[in-house]
Amino acid sequence: MRCGVWGTDWRNGGFMKSGRRNLITDVAGLVVGNAHDETLRSGSTVLTSDRPFTAGVHIMGGAPGTRETDLLAPDKLVEQVDALVLSGGSAFGLDACSGVADGLRAADRGFDVGGQRVPIVPGAILFDLLTGGDKSWDRNPYYDLGRRSLGNVSDDFALGTAGAGYGATTAGLMGGLGSASCVLETGETIGALVAVNALGSATVGNSARFWAAPFEIGDEFGGRGVARVYPRDIRTKTALSREATTIAIVATDAGLSQAQCARMATAAHDGMARALVPSHTPMDGDLVFGVSSGDAPRLDDPTRLLQIGHAAATCLARAIARGVYEATGYENAPFPVWRDKFTDAS
């Protein structure tokens, strides 16, 4: 399927193209690591680099679970971070950040405070405690998952039932870990990484077609095309997915300040709303981190920042659909996966 009108570069009508991997790691310098526990049916994902990077955040869900997001405000002392963590496990999953921080400290990474290295590792969690698996631990397992995810970092990584998306669900289908990228005609690369664990649905009604279909590049999530939408297709399916949260990172190699990273993250929430119906509810913690990597000159053109925000929203919508599309699930999963449910051309 060719990318349609809403997937274009709005400024001059040229089509966006995906990066080489169609992953957030197309943004230079970024790597991602996943770890999961099949018995626990949960996991964690870390995004990091070989040096600190600028980050901001914007939260629109009504029930977020976070670590160190306050320090990402533009008026705080530390502008750059060493890693960002997405994790399952609800509040327990925040311990994945501690595992990542200890791993970075062992590598002599972190903010230097009088000779002591303090890795800056903000994180966010999603609720996956009701999707099966053994949750009767004596010692929180997410520290080890975080440490393992850091040990697995690469510029290539699994999507779907992997990392923080391992136990994720949506309304009627398993969720998953998704990613996508695009390259603008002005040269900037933008990428998105998301753990899709939504109260709402990524697909339209009972069809195989994704809400994000207008933004699809090629057949990256099946190429089923755009669905005709009826009023019944936008009903809230809260009985199917009671507790949820979709957590994401959008990144670019453009030179953004911390405030501009937060603005890019804010714009990217549009992509979440385009790809998940409903989103940003009182019962979820929907959140987007914004990241700027590399040494590009500081961007001072608001029109280009608008472009980057639009591209980040588009990438996030695509990444959400890819997370659901790539899910493989596990035995006795609470919902089917997209590939098993839609084997015909519906």
Image: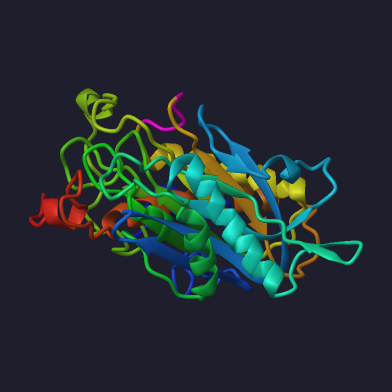
Horizontal placement of 150 versus 17: left or right?
right
Q: Residue at x 26, y 42 (%)?
A: 203
Q: Quadrant of residue 240?
A: top left
Foreground: 296 or 280? 280
Where's residue 151, x and y in %?
A: 53, 74
- The segment highlighted magenta reads 278-282
> Which residue is at the far right?
114
Q: Residue at x 75, y 41 (%)?
A: 73
Horizontal placement of 320 versus 155: left or right?
left
> Which residue is at the far front?
138
Count of all numbered marks drawn on residues in the image: 0
Where's residue 225, x and y in %?
A: 24, 51
Q: Is residue 312 visible?
A: no
Which corner quadrant holds the N terminus?
Answer: bottom left
Most common secondary structure along the magenta stretch: loop
Q: Quadrant of residue 220?
A: bottom left
Q: How is the image coloured?
A: rainbow
Q: Is residue 122 magenta?
A: no
Where's residue 239, x and y in %?
A: 24, 26
Residue 282, placed above or below residue 12: above
Q: Residue at x 29, y 38 (%)?
A: 201
Residue 157, placed above or below residue 234: below
Q: Residue at x 20, y 52 (%)?
A: 338
Q: Is residue 166 visible?
A: yes
Horizontal placement of 72 versus 153: left or right?
right
Foreground: 98 or 4? 98
Where's residue 226, x and y in %?
A: 26, 46
Foreground: 16 or 29? 29
